[in-house]
Amino acid sequence: HDEEFPPRILDHVMKNAIKGDVTNVIDVIDKYCWSVEIAMNVGDVKGAILDKSFLEASPKNVLEIGCYCGYSALRMSRLLKEDAKIFTIEASSQYADVAQEIISFAGMEKKVQILRGLSDEVLPTIAEKCGVRTFDFVFIDHAKELYKRDLIMLENLGLIRQGTTIMADNVIFPGCPDYLEYVRNSPKFECTNYPSKLEYCENREDAMEKSIYLP
Ligand SMILES: Cc1ncccc1-c1cc(O)c2nc[nH]c(=O)c2c1
Ligand SMILES: [Mg+2]
């Protein structure tokens, strides 16, 4: 991916969005990505699917794996209930720097905490570091080859509980066949597929997969 997109979107947001207005920041990012250049945000169409599952779950503790520029963290933060929080893991310090700026510009820095590092390095200590026992909602949107490994890690570390909702982006494109096979064949997960399109595209199929953990 174009390494230079993050600084460009940050600059565009600072110049064109309303400081402290999270809905406007989201809208400005979507308009830019539809009109100027595609970026790997979950986007507005799949974002609406994420919103709906998020509201149904009404979570207190939220985990995101793959923050990128903070777009999906902002989408979820605007729907958070009182004293709820989002913890988002980002391995790229360049992405994390930009995400921090965008999240702060939108006024959501108290609701979203970025954890810098690789998911398999952050997850083992996240409970005590963040003062969280289990997560109520998890959004997986990082590298497709790590989805299955990280879900198994969440289970083994006891970071998900009876009823936790796990949403996964890109289960068609780029696609994560081993993850899908794992959750759909496991008796511990109730899965629902939401067909959609790749962000900011009209003609490429993608989908989100919702998995409710029922151990
Ligand atoms: C945008 C895009 N274009 C062509 C090929 C792949 C992608 C793409 C789309 C996404 O939503 C992604 N989400 C998380 N991590 C990714 O690597 C990723 C990549
Ligand atoms: Mg994605």
Image (cartoon, helix red, strand yellow):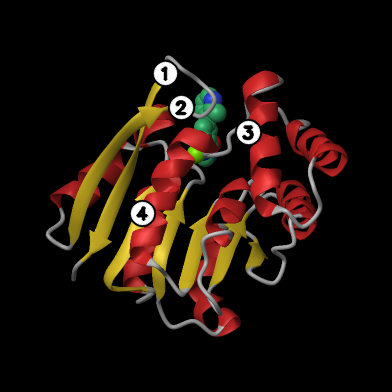
Q: Amino acid at mark 1?
A: Arg
**Looking at the image, do the residues carrying marks 2 and 1 touch, with CB atoms under 8 Å apart?**
yes
Q: Nearer the viewer, mark 2 or mark 4?
A: 4
Query: Mark 4 = which residue?
Result: 53
Determine the secondary structure under disc 1.
loop
Visible in this render: residue 1?
Answer: no
Determine the secondary structure under disc 2.
loop
* Distance (Cα) linking label 1 and label 4: 23 Å
Determine which of the numbered discs, if any, sits on residue 30 in the image.
Answer: 3
Local packing at callout 2 (Cα closer than 10 Å; few below 14, some 14-19, many 20+) is many
Q: Position of residue 82 (x, y in %)?
A: 54, 77
**Looking at the image, do the residues carrying marks 3 and 1 touch, with CB atoms under 8 Å apart?**
no
Is the C terminus in the top left, top right, bottom left or bottom right quadrant?
bottom left
Is the N terminus in the top left, top right, bottom left or bottom right quadrant?
top right
* Distance (Cα) linking label 2 and label 1: 6 Å
* Distance (Cα) linking label 3 and label 1: 17 Å
Local packing at callout 3 (Cα closer than 10 Å; few below 14, some 14-19, many 20+) is many
Determine which of the numbered discs, if any, sits on residue 198 in the image.
Answer: 2
Determine the secondary structure under disc 3.
helix
Q: Position of residue 81 (x, y in %)?
A: 50, 72
Q: Nearer the viewer, mark 3 or mark 2?
A: 3
* Distance (Cα) linking label 3 and label 4: 20 Å
Q: Residue at x 75, y 38 (%)?
A: 6
Q: Position of residue 37 (x, y in %)?
A: 68, 22
Query: Mark 1 = which residue?
Result: 204
Q: Position of residue 30 (x, y in %)?
A: 63, 33
Cβ of mark 2 under 8 Å from ligand 1: the answer is: yes
